[in-house]
Every structure is written in structure tokens, then in C-alpha cells.
Image (spheres, grey):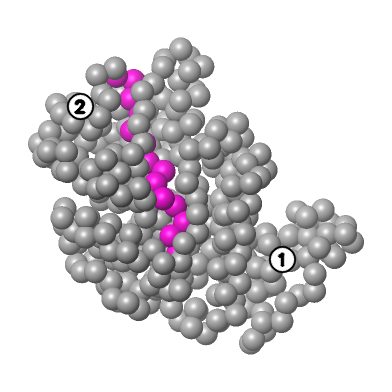
């Protein structure tokens, strides 16, 4: 877990009077400073905008300390939100729907991530999902977003996934990456930046890989060019009691995503620290990631289509029903 205080933020900015001037005066929020503001993200690109946001003076002014941590599984995220440990977190879009429909007091703030999943293989005979018939596949987060997206797309291409594919699961994408690089799997579903790590490290040892984007498959089978895979959720009670802070969080997410898109070298350096991967790998991954903040209300149509698609596999994947209008924040 990383803890950012105002003092630490100024040190990051340079620790000089110029940095202090850049930070500006401590913003006066209604109700004064919070003791702690908890932020969380996964081992994937959404962590980068939240990690960057945690150092912004406008955000560090909200609380005496900003605690940022990575969650390693959807279950870990659920625990963080239900026990009040985290107020703002990156989330798979269906996990947010499940939490809301189960009565957890959260709302969806936005969608920021429009597809980061790829299939990576050493085999020359796998160039599409139907080519997986009779073969082995390694994925991660059993029952989570990577698993259900792959299953849905396979179903739409005429496959019975459980019968046609021999699937095994890693606990995290980085564990899956290590298993793949160690030769324990020939074909794997991975997100960025693990995809770029697999490609670069395999190239170094002379083992070329084939890869294709599941976002491209989504467009092929649905005719829609955007897959609302992940975004940001907030605790409802915190959001209701802190409208000024919530407004600043929205602005800061947007500005941090702009920073990601326009300062990729600096973002790669941040990613190297968060993911324990070399910066050149993160830099390559950033070219393959579509990050854009769209409010949940604006993304509602895309989300409803996506949720209905997942419900074809099982309504449980969105918590049994479509979330009502109270789920989608402007």
C-alpha cells in the first residue's frame, strides 16, 4: 500500500518553493480534511490514472493521507468496498453492477477502459477463438471479467466453451504471465501491460508469438466498437456527503487519463513502479490501451448492451438484473 501525504506529494513534485507554489494553498473542502481517502486499482492500466491522481495537490488536499493500494482479485475489491477501506476504486464494470444489485452502497462514476484483453499464443494454428477447440487455454480471475468476456465471445462464435476448451486459471494476470513465460501454457488471455511483457520477453529468446485483441472480436460479433470493460466506482455514502470532493475526483480522473495519454514516457516510469516491470514494456503497452473517461450516465447505453450480453451467459454475472438508474452517476 502506498500512502501519499501533502508533504510527500510536494517531495514528488520537487520539494522546492516552486513546487509549493505549483501545489497552491490547501483547498478548503466543506467539513474540513478527511483523515484518510482510500483509493484502489487492479494490476492493469486503470491503476495508473488512480496512482497518478493520488499525487495531485487537489486530491491530497482532501485528506490528511491518501492510501492507494492494488487489489489482486475481484473478491479483494469487494472486501475493500464493503468494509469501508476504500472510497474510490477502479472496477470491472460487471463487478460494480453485482455489488450494486446485492445492496452494497456503491455507484458507478465512469467508464475509463474500453478493452485491454488479448489472446496470446505460441501456436501457429490459433488465430481466432474457434481455433481453441480441443486445445488448452490459461486465463485468470475465474468467473471475472477476462473469463466471462472470453466465454461470451466464444459462445457468439458457435463454441461450447466448457466442452470445447480445456481451461485453467491463474490467480492474477502477473501469475499467468510468469506461468506462460515458464512454458507452463502455450496460449493465454492477458491484459496490458502483461501482453507487452510476454511479447518482448518471448522475442528476446527467439520465440515469436501470435496475438489478437478481444476488443476486435467484440466489434466483430456485436458490431459495436466500444467494450465498456472497466471504470471507477465510489461509495454512495461518501459521494453523497462529499459532493465537492466527488466533483474534484471526476476532474482529477479526467486530467490523469489525459496525462497518461499525452505523457507516455512519464507514465511508463510510474507503471514500472506499480507493476514491477521494465518501463519500456509499460511504454509499449500504453500504445495498445484505449483509455478515455466517459461518465457512467453517458456510457449507460454501452453498459446496458454489455450487461445484457453478459446475461446471455448468466444473469448472475451482473447480479441478477440490470442496475436501476440510481447506479449511473453523471
Spot the residue most to the front: 223
What residue do we see at 32% from left, 72% from top?
100
Spot the residue most to the bottom: 31
What residue do we see at 89% from left, 61% from top?
17
Q: Mark 1 points at which residue?
A: 57
Give the left or right position of residue 319, taking residue 45 as reference. left
Q: Where is residue 82 in the image (x, y as percent from the top left)?
A: 39, 71
Q: Can residue 281 be spotted in the picture?
A: yes
- Circle 1 packing at 10 Å, graded few (<14), some (14-19), many (20+), is many
* Quarter occupied by residue 270: top right
Determine the secondary structure under disc 1: helix
Q: Give the range drawn in magenta.
A: 110-123
* Quarter occupied by residue 95: bottom left
What residue do we see at 54% from left, 63% from top?
39
The secondary structure that most of the magenta stretch takes on is: strand
The residue mark sitting in front, 1 or 2, is 2
Q: Name the residue under label 2.
A: 131
Amino acid at each position: 500500500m502506498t500512502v501519499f501525504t501533502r508533504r510527500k506529494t510536494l517531495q514528488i513534485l520537487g520539494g522546492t518553493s516552486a513546487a509549493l507554489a505549483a501545489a497552491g494553498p490547501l483547498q478548503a473542502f466543506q467539513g474540513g480534511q478527511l483523515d484518510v481517502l482510500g483509493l484502489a486499482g487492479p494490476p492493469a492500466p486503470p491503476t495508473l490514472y488512480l496512482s497518478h491522481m493520488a499525487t495531485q495537490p487537489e486530491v491530497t488536499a482532501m485528506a490528511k493521507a491518501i492510501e492507494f493500494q492494488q487489489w489482486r482479485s475481484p473478491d479483494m475489491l469487494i472486501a475493500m468496498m464493503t468494509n469501508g477501506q476504500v472510497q474510490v476504486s477502479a472496477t470491472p464494470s460487471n463487478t460494480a453492477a453485482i455489488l450494486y444489485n446485492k445492496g452494497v452502497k456503491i455507484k458507478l462514476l465512469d467508464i475509463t477502459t474500453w478493452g485491454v484483453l488479448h489472446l496470446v499464443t505460441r501456436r501457429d494454428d490459433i488465430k481466432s477463438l474457434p481455433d481453441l477447440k480441443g486445445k488448452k487455454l490459461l486465463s485468470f480471475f475465474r468467473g471475472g471479467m477476462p473469463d466471462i468476456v472470453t466465454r461470451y465471445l466464444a459462445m457468439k462464435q458457435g463454441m461450447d466453451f466448457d466442452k470445447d476448451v480445456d481451461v485453467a486459471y491463474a490467480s492474477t494476470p502477473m501469475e499467468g504471465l510468469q506461468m506462460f513465460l515458464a512454458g507452463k501454457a502455450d496460449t493465454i488471455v492477458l491484459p496490458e501491460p502483461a501482453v507487452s511483457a510476454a511479447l518482448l520477453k518471448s522475442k528476446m529468446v527467439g520465440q515469436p508469438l501470435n496475438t489478437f485483441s478481444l476488443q476486435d472480436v467484440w466489434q466483430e460479433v456485436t458490431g459495436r466498437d466500444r467494450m465498456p470493460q472497466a471504470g471507477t466506482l465510489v461509495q454512495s455514502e461518501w459521494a453523497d456527503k462529499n459532493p465537492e470532493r466527488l466533483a474534484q475526483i471526476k476532474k482529477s480522473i479526467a486530467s490523469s487519463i489525459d496525462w497518461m495519454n499525452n505523457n507516455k514516457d512519464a507514465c511508463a516510469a510510474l507503471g514500472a513502479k506499480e507493476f514491477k516491470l521494465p518501463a519500456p514494456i509499460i511504454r509499449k503497452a500504453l500504445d495498445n490501451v484505449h483509455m478515455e473517461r466517459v461518465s457512467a450516465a453517458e456510457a449507460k447505453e454501452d453498459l446496458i448492451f454489455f450487461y445484457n450480453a453478459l446475461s446471455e451467459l448468466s444473469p448472475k454475472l451482473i447480479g441478477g438484473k440490470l442496475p436501476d438508474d440510481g447506479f449511473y452517476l453523471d
